[in-house]
Image (cartoon, rainbow, N blue to C red):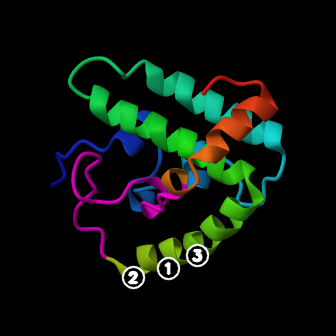
Amino acid sequence: MSGEFNPYHKWLGIPKKNCPPTYYELLRISVDEQDREVIRMAVGRQKEHMEQFQVGKKAKAASKIIYELEEAEVTLLNQELRREYDQRVGSIKKRRTQRQISSMPSIDGNNTSAGEGSGLLRQYTGIVSVLAVNTGQKT
């Protein structure tokens, strides 16, 4: 499995042992970061970088990561969602230390995505439009 493509590692430099990454790792910010502008800038930086990979054979993987970046932004900018997510981060890190890294997760496979598939964005889809209106950003 060493030849399996890992977009988090190859494109974002996230260590293989941290894959799939938490939202904080995906954005390369501290779990203590509260500055909304820092979070928005981190999302923008990572999305801009990922857009160059949205063509070719691995475009699907790039699009999936861009979606995860958007999910991370919505989650980390909403206090209630962030509180729920932060509880999950503790269990994610615990699972990482317990598992053996024998194969890397596939972005297109059955493995979970950033945030261990929290699905918080899908659960709270209305928040996206609220954030867009409040921040003046397009959805």
The numbered dot on residue 4 is none
In the image, taking residue 72 as reference, residue 95 lies left or right, namely left
Q: Is residue 127 visible?
A: yes
Q: Crowding at label 1, few (<14), some or many (≥20) Cα neighbours within 10 Å?
A: few
At which x and y percent is residue 40? 72, 35
Magenta part, dominant SS: loop
In the rendered view, tell whether residue 47 sits above or below residue 106.
above
Q: Is residue 14 magenta?
A: no
Q: CA distance from mark 1 to mark 3?
A: 6 Å
22 and 84: which is toward the camera: 84
Residue named by callout 1: 94
Categorize mark 2 by other alpha carbons within 10 Å: few (<14), some (14-19), many (20+): few
Tell which residue pokes out farthest to the front in this image. Answer: 126
Q: Residue at x 62, y 53 (%)?
A: 24
Give above or below for 127 relative to 100: above
Confirm or deny contact between disc 2 and disc 1 (CB under 8 A).
Answer: yes
CB atoms of marks 1 and 3 within 8 Å:
yes
What residue did someone put label 3 on?
A: 90
Q: Position of residue 108 (x, y in %)?
A: 24, 46
Residue for point 84% across, 46% down: 35
* Residue name at image x 61 percent, y 65 percent: 85
Q: Quadrant of residue 30?
A: bottom right
Which residue sits furthest right?
Answer: 35
- The residue wearing badge 2 is 98
Q: Amino acid at mark 3?
A: Gly
For label 1, the SS is helix
First-in-chain label (3 vs 2): 3
97 is higher (above) or lower (below) than 24:
below
Examine the rendering and report whether any part of residue 28 can be seen: no
Q: Which residues are magenta?
A: 100-120
